[in-house]
Amino acid sequence: MRQRQVASPLPTPRPLKLPASLALAVARRRQLPLSEPRSASAELVGQQVRALRLCSGASAGKLAANAGISRSMLSRIERGLVCASVETLERIAVGLGVGLARLFVQPSGRSTFCHVPAGMGTHVQHTGEVAEHCRQMLGQLRSGNLCIEPWLVRLGPEAETFGASSQQAKVQFVYTLAGRLACRIGDQVVELSAGDSLLLGASIEFGVEAIGAQAATYLFVTFTLRT
């Protein structure tokens, strides 16, 4: 004898039908893994944005605020996960202090180096400097938007000191090789001896206020972001 089916008290499940626009967005999201760049162009732009941001010393939060986007959106742009609009990229470029075209520069892929034999650096002397202030330019390297210049500086005991000045858009590195120096960094004075180093952010004022009894020699490297 056939058993009578009893109706379930629960509603019959039915497939949920999404709106066409939402269904298309979900389909695209499934096809594009979040961990992979959206395209080669998006990845290139993202790499440029990140490189320029790091060179300028700006934090992700500050750049995002200046560009009028969220920090998470900036992170996705830098990783190439989204194709930002031209208006957004223009605001990012303004926040970085560069032209919009700079974000689309294709890396050359060249291997660049600069070799200077001992004692063969370019001697540079400014008007008014005394003989005991000797500076040698040890080379110049341009890689993408970054320019690096190492200098070997020797200050004799009678050399004239120079006051603190600001190097706009330049990150500076000082490594003391010999002697002693008293350096002015903003409103502070830091004493350096052989083996001591300084790393100065962009726009930080730096100068030499005093030199020890013996000649002082130090390596001075500047990192400049070209626009």
Image (cartoon, helix red, strand yellow):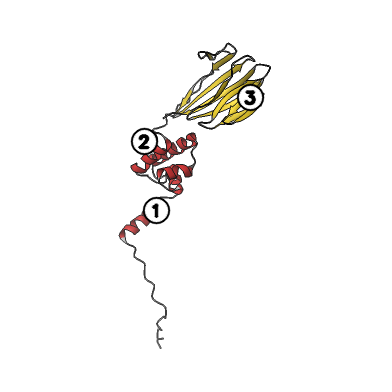
Image quarter (top left, top right, bottom left or bottom right) of the N terminus: bottom left
Choose top left, top right, bottom left or bottom right for residue 4: bottom left
C-alpha distance separating marks 1 and 2: 29 Å
The image position of residue 65, as x and y in percent, is 44, 45
Secondary structure beneath dot 3 equals: strand
Going by the numbered disc 1, the residue's amino acid type is Arg
Mark 3 is surrounded, within 10 Å at the Cα level, by few (under 14), some (14 to 19) or many (20 or more) other residues, namely some
Q: Which residue is denoted by mark 1 in the rendering?
A: 29
Which residue is found at the position 42% from the left and 31% from the top?
Answer: 107
C-alpha distance separating marks 2 and 3: 42 Å
Using the image, tell me which numbered label, if any, was put on residue 166. Answer: none
Going by the numbered disc 3, the residue's amino acid type is Ala
Q: Which residue is denoted by mark 3 in the rendering?
A: 182
Q: Which residue is denoted by mark 2 in the rendering?
A: 100
Going by the numbered disc 2, the residue's amino acid type is Leu
The image position of residue 227, as x and y in percent, is 41, 30
